[in-house]
Image (cartoon, rainbow, N blue to C red):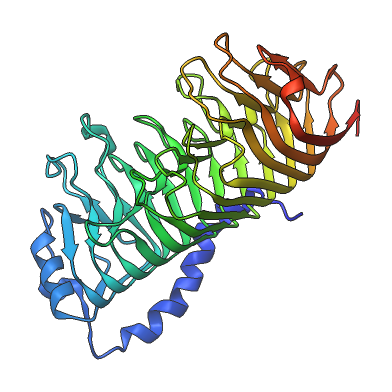
Amino acid sequence: MKKLFLFDLLLLKAMRTLFGIVFLCPLLFNAQSVNLSTYGFNTNDNKKGFNEAIRNNDTIIVDKQSSNWFVSPLKLRNLQNKTIIFENDVVLQAKPGAYVNTSDALLKFINCKNLKIIGNGSMLLMNKSEYIDGEWRMGLSLMGCSNVEIKNLTISSSGGDGIYIDGYKDTRFSENILIDGVISTNNKRQGISVISAKNVWVKNSIFTKTKGTLPEAGLDIEPDSETDVIINVNFEHCSFTNNNHSGIVIGLDNLTDKSEPVSINFKDCYLSMNHDVSNRYPAAEIIISSHPEFPVKGNVSFSDIVIDESNWRLLYSRKPSKGYHTSFKNISAIDICKQRDDLSVIYFEVPDYFKSSGPIGGFSFENMYVKYNSKSSFFTVRGSSLGTLNGIKNVTGDITIVNPNLTEFIEYIKYSSSKNKNFDVKYIIQKTD
C-alpha cells in the first residue's frame, strides 16, 4: 500500500506551480485569450472587468498585479467553452464587506458547460472572520454545470464550503467534473460538498482545517432530496486532515430506495487528526449513513486507505443493511482512538429516536490492519432501550489487530447477538507487531 505522507502534501503546492507552466505556455498564444488587466485593474473591486472579460473572450488570464484582485460576488450563468488561467501566485480575493447575502459566493457558476480553471498555484481567498451569519458563502460553486476542469488552485477562508457541487433547478446534477491538485483549507462549513453529481473525479487534492459551523467535515456527500444523484463520484490520492469534524461524511439520508443507486469510490487516500472534541456530531474519521427505513441502493468503496494519528474511531454508522453496500479493502489504521480508553474502532448504533425497518449493516472489511492502544473492544454494536435495533446483517471481513490492551473483539450494548445474520468477521489479535 502506498501511503500519502505529510511531506508529500507539503510538496504538492510547489510541484503544481511547475506543472502549471505546461498548462500556461501554450494558452498564452491563444488568439482568443486576453489578460484580465486589459479591462483595467482596480484596487477596490474588479467585478465589472471580470464579467466583461469572460463574456467577450474564450480565455482570460488573471495576470499578476501589485496587489490582490478584489471582487464582489461573481455569479456567472450559461457560459460555454471558457478557460480561466491564473498566473503563478495570483490571489483572487473577496472584497471585504461586499458579501452581505448569505448565499454570495466568490465564484458561482450556474448552467455552465466546457469550463476550465487553471490555477498555477494561485488562490481564491475569502474573509471567513467577517461571515458571522449563514453557511453558504462558497469559495467555488458549480450548479448544474458540465464538463468542468479545475486544476492547481488553493481555496481558502470561505464562509461556507471550499467547493460546492450541485444541480440547479431542472438541471438535476452537475456532471463530468475533474478537480486535480486543489487545496481547500480553513473553510467554514466543509472542505468540499457534493450534493447532486454524476461522473466526478477529485485527484491529488487536500481538504484540511475546516472549522466554523457544523458539520465542519473535510468532505460531505449529502444530497438534499430524493431526486438528487450521486453516481460515479471518485476521490483518488486525496488527503483529509485536521478538520473539526470527520474527514469523510457519506450522508445519504435524503436518498431513498426510489432514488438512483449511488456509486462512490475512494482510492489511495489519507486521513489524520479529524474531529475535535468541541464538535457535537459523532466522532470518527469516516461517517456512513442513509435513510433509516428506505435506504438507497448502490455501492461505496474504500481501497488502499491510510488512517494515521487520530484521536477518534475509524468508522461510525447507522446504515441499514438493505441499502448500499460499503466495502473497505487494504486499510491501514495506526495510532487511532487516542482520545479515550473506551473508544472502539468501529461503532454501529441505533439510538432511541432512530426508526428502522430492518437490520443495520452491509459492510465488508478485507485485509484491514489496525494498531492502537485503547482498552475498549474493537467493534461496538449499540442498540437502545426501545429495542429499535432489530439485527446486524451482512458484515464480513478479515482484520489484523495489534493492541496490547484488547480484551474482546466485539461488545454488544442493549442488543442480543442472537439477531445477527451473516456476521462473519475473521480477526487476529496481536499484542505487538
- From the top left corner, tell me how far across and down residue 21 is, in percent: 44, 76
Question: Which image quadrant for residue 40?
Answer: bottom left
* Along the line of sight, the residue nearer the viewer: 388 or 314: 388
Q: Kindly indicate the quadrant of the structure image that contains residue 349.
A: top right
Q: Nearer the viewer, residue 244 or 11?
A: 244
* Residue 92 horizontal/vertical position (percent): 26, 57
Is residue 404 placed above or below 25 in the rendered structure?
A: above
Asked whether, in this view, residue 418 is left or right of residue 97, the answer is right
**Which residue is at the far left?**
48
Rendered position, 227 above or below 282: below
Residue at figure coordinates x 39%, y 47% from the top left: 193
Give the residue at x 17% y 71%.
37
Residue found 30% across the figure and 58% down from its top: 172
Q: Quadrant of residue 118?
A: bottom left
Q: In the picture shown, does residue 316 fall above or below 236?
A: above
Q: Position of residue 54 (x, y in %)?
A: 18, 73
Image quarter where the C terminus lies is: top right
Q: Is residue 260 left or right of residue 425?
A: left
Q: Is residue 311 visible?
A: no
Outermost residue to the top: 385
x 22%, y 49%: residue:
105
Does any portion of residue 15 appear in the rendered image?
A: yes
Count of numbered circles in the view: 0
Q: Position of residue 400 (x, y in %)?
A: 85, 37
The reply, left or right, for residue 16 in relation to residue 156 is right
Work out which quarter of the rendered image holds the N terminus and state it.
bottom right
Q: In this image, 115 relative to 153: left or right?
A: left
